[in-house]
Amino acid sequence: MVFHLDKCIGCHTCSVACKNVWTDREGTDYMWWNNVETKPGTGFPTKWEDQESYKGGWKTDGEKLELRSTSKKKIIPNIFHNPSQPSLDDYYEPWTYNYDELFNAPEGDDQPVARPISMITGEPMEIEAGPNWDDDLGGSEVYAANDPNLDVLSDEQQQQMKAIERMVMFYLPRICNHCLNPSCVAACPSGAMYKRGEDGIVLINQDRCRAWRSCISACPYKKTYYNWSTGKSEKCILCFPRLEAGEAPACFHSCVGRIRYLGNVLYDADRIKEAALRPDDELVEAQRDTILDPHDPAVIAAAQASGIPDGVIESAQKSPVYRFAKEWKLGLPLHVEYRTFPMLFYVPPLLPVMSISDGDIVRSDVDELFAEVEKARAPIEYLGKLFSAGNVGKVRYALRKQLAVRIWRRHVTVGDVAEEMAKKALAEADCTPEQADEIYRLSALATWDDRFVIPPFQREMAMEMMTDPHEHRASAGFGSREEPRRS
Amino acid sequence: MNDFIMFGVLPYVVATVFLIVTILRYRTKAFSYSSLSSQFLENQQHFWGSVPFHYGILVVLLGHTLGFLMPEMILSWNAAPLRLMLLEVTGIAFAVLTLVGLANIVLRRLTRPLMREVTTLGDWVVYLLLLVQVLTGIGVAVFHGWGSSWFATNLTPWLWSLVKLSPDVTYVAPLPFLVKLHITNAFLLVGFFPFTRLVHILVVPNPYLWRRTQVVIWNWDRSRLRDVD
Ligand code: SF4
Ligand code: SF4
């Protein structure tokens, strides 16, 4: 998966599409399998990035990899009460309004009002927080100022970011990353969580989940949620029933900014462990190294030998994810230092959009243009903290390349940039005119078929193996043969 | 006669219900096997309820099990009065710990509106039975002391007679009322067990400790897939 952050308009269509399809049931009311945060901000649940308190993800001393929350050793003393589990207060109490008041109130001097009603107790309540309380820097003194990622900036840089005329923000849509090295799966004591071999989707078997809640603490992205009503954990299932029918997931399909790309990649599972042991600043590259070139005959042969169908190999060759994340090196993983190797890659936002013409004068100096990447309002260290575990070189590379593509396209379409200068910009950004055109095409013009290259999942074949489709449904993270009632 | 029904028949009824219902429930309603944790809705008092309760009851149950499995060992340990005192005091301490936890659990459920939403009739039955069990247990320990010794001499032989399918209630008949109440209530608890959330005890996740870290499941039969084309 790739999310192109420069294109996200923060409309939350994706979140609502997901909510309407999957999480409008009792107990899931507070969940947002897809949510869109404003950065800088504290996000959802509040300060999820603060692993000092939530203890998500992995830690390593260079030799051993260990869960930060309840590893095998620590599950025994902590099973009765999980010390790092977030509670409702860290999310919000879901509510609705008693709309019927508006219609049924007796005639009187005052306008009737619809009061907020808790969706848990059904009683009137005071709203104290919501899933998106800091949208568009709302309440930024409380929220944006507490963004854990600001730690890497100097006081001066922080002040600059807050100054009203330089105020900067961007949107960060988040779903489960369907990680390569999922800490949620590793932490599940019941073995109810698993990664599907065919497509890497991470699921929770509803019949085997026993509400030990370990995954909730262990996922550093807080993308497994506890259903307080059924006593089972639930998470994004990447709309696998849609994928198996050749459709894009609901959030991808509905995305207004068309920022989302979906495709499969071939990777070497044997390299994951070693990669996860590398120091922070090598992690982006280490993860990239696990992804293999689907055009390489050796890779194709190896994939065939391990039973990957040709259709899946073919779609890996056409995958937009491979191009963004590996070939062009534009896609970067969010917080790779958690060492789960998220398979959702973000193209970092160019902030602000840099202008090539200063009034009437067209800039002629490439260095001067690139200097703006460093001077951008969102300090590069901040983006580095989010997207490359502090290795700002990776972010700088992605931003410079995006900028070079713009300069090149300006040359091609408007023509007020000299070819020589445009080519120099491309060369300095490790890009060729052909590649620049492809990046441009996939970023700006891509159609449904370009954005979503869904491998043929051979659903009939998969279902054939299942003795009972209903049982399959429950084991695949959604639904159950029984009424989800507590006993 | 009464004694025979209570201590010679009830145990078998309860054991049968327990076995049949837990197995049936696991096979037909696997979804309902959950600890139904409520930590998500309330995070602080949960600690002071769940943790002392579980640690307390685990140690107390361990004590009972030891008395059942190795009565001689307990008796020889108890031969020295100081060691007997030590064992009794430890037992009472953990029983009190259980009670503190249980009190917190019940209060938490009673006083918090969010908690009431997720508390069912089954939960209340369990809490009531547990309260009676822990209170009578502490009562027995205080008023009919040295239970660790007479458990080994009276109850262990009776329990073994149950196991051997020739119930001999003469061991239990002379025991005081409080002890009999404690025993009967324990069997009621076992009888209700399969209908309540207590079934989570049967699915404690021990395999976690030795399974591989990551779990990958293939739905496709890959060898077949390649052969097809
Ligand atoms: S992002 Fe998804 S796959 Fe990764 S650890 Fe969290 S829940 Fe698991
Ligand atoms: S629908 Fe697309 S553009 Fe809108 S908020 Fe979601 S990711 Fe951003």
Image (cartoon, rainbow, N blue to C red):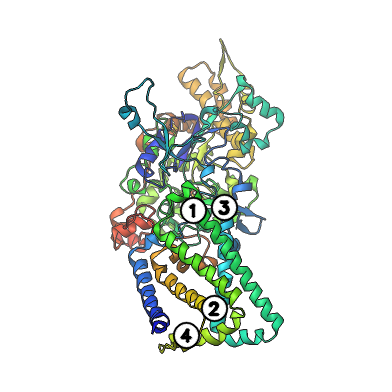
Tell me the tag on residue B45.
Answer: 3
**Residue A429 or residue A485, whichever sits in front:** A485
B44 in relation to B61, above or below: above
The residue indicated by pointer 1 is B109
Three-letter code for the amino acid on which mark 2 is drawn: Thr
Say whether marks 2 and 4 touch (CB < 8 Å): no
> Is the same chain shared between marks 2 and 1?
yes
Query: Which residue does the image show at 38% across and 55% down from the upper left?
Result: A476
Helix, strand or loop at mark 2: helix
Structural distance between the alpha carbons of marks 2 and 4: 21 Å
- Visible in this render: residue A375? no
Q: Amino acid at mark 3?
A: Gln
Q: Nearer the viewer, mark 3 or mark 1?
A: 1
Is the residue marked 4 within 8 Å of ligand 1, measured from its CB?
Answer: no
Q: Secondary structure at mark 1?
A: helix
Say what amino acid the circle numbered 1 marks: Arg
Q: Earlier in the sequence, mark 4 or mark 3?
A: 3
Using the image, name the chain to which the residue with label 2 belongs. Answer: B
Q: Tell me the distance, in whole angstroms, between the alpha carbons under discs 3 and 2.
A: 30 Å
Label 3: element kind = helix
Question: Residue at label 4?
Answer: B173
Q: Chain of mark 3?
A: B
Mark 2 — residue?
A: B65
Q: Amino acid at mark 4?
A: Ala
